[in-house]
Amino acid sequence: MIIRVISRGSMTSEVTKWWKGLARELEDDIESLEE
């Protein structure tokens, strides 16, 4: 599903913003688990 959006090219920037936000949330979760 995400790949289809990226292949279109028109929403790549939106996917990038979403992916960066998701990665940031995952990093926060990992840090909280390590504590």
Image (cartoon, helix red, strand yellow):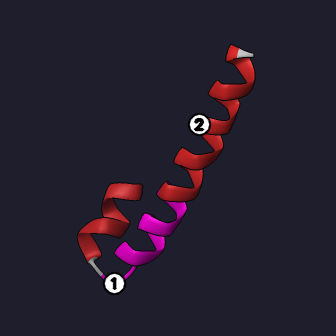
- Circle on res. 10: 1
- Circle on res. 21: none
Residue at image point 32% right, 57% down: 3
Residue at image point 67% right, 37% down: 28
Quadrant position of residue 32: top right
Query: Picture coordinates of residue 14 (x, y %)?
Result: 47, 74
Q: Which residue is mark 2?
A: 27
> Is the stretch drawn in magenta largely helix, strand or loop?
helix
Do the residues under discs 1 and 2 have CB atoms within 8 angstroms?
no
Q: Is residue 32 above or below residue 20?
A: above
Quadrant showing the C terminus: top right
> Which stretch is magenta?
10-19
Q: CA distance from mark 1 to mark 2?
A: 28 Å
Residue at image point 59% right, 36% down: 27
Query: Picture coordinates of residue 9 (x, y %)?
Result: 27, 78
The three-letter amino acid code for the residue at tag 1 is Ser
Which residue is at the front of the view, 35 or 22? 35
Q: Residues within 10 Å of mark 2 (few under 14, many from 20)?
A: few
Of callouts 1 and 2, which one flags the residue occurring earlier in the amino acid sequence? 1
Which residue is at the front of the view, 8 or 19? 19
Residue at image point 58% right, 57% down: 21
